[in-house]
Amino acid sequence: MNNPFKTLNQKAKRAIRDKAIQRAKTRIVLLQKKPEDFEPDELEVIVQEEESKIYSAIKEKGLLAVLAVLGLNIFG
């Protein structure tokens, strides 16, 4: 039997990663640069920083609120 919490955890991690990538792209644009201007390691650091901000928001606001913002449904 498939564990629904494991599936939700995987979906949440993927959604957080995707949102962090979107935020990183926005951050790069605001710096008036292109992703090609950065080394792959630098891009990863930027994405990890954005992921860290999202995880901090989860701790502050609660998991259910963040899942709603990310568009994930606990029941489906």
Image (spheres, rainbow, N blue to C red):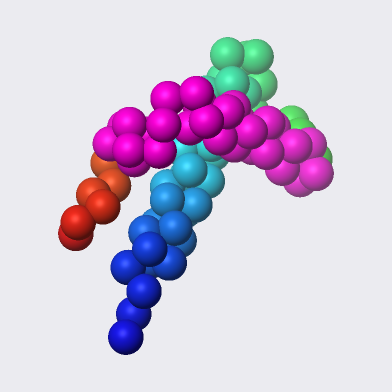
Query: Residue at point 40% right, 38% down?
Result: 63
The residue at the point 68 percent across, 38 percent down is 48
Image position of 66 with respect to 72: above or below: above
Secondary structure that dominates the magenta span: helix
Q: Which residue is farthest bottom?
A: 1
Quadrant location of the C terminus in the rendered image: bottom left
Residue 36 counted in the magenta span: no
Q: Report if residue 57 is visible in the image.
A: yes
Q: Quadrant of the N terminus?
A: bottom left
**Residue 73 point in image, percent of width and height:** 23, 49
User: Residue placed at 44% from the left, 58% from the top?
Assistant: 9
Query: Residue 3, located in which quarter of the rendered image?
Result: bottom left
Q: Is residue 62 magenta?
A: yes
Percent across and percent down for residue 62 are: 41, 31
Q: Would residue 17 appear left or right of 70 to someone viewing this image?
A: right
Q: Name the one closer to the observer, 38 or 13.
A: 13
Q: Residue at coordinates 33% horizontally, 38% vertically from top-left?
A: 64
Residue 15, position as x, y percentages in the image = 42, 47
The magenta segment = 40-69
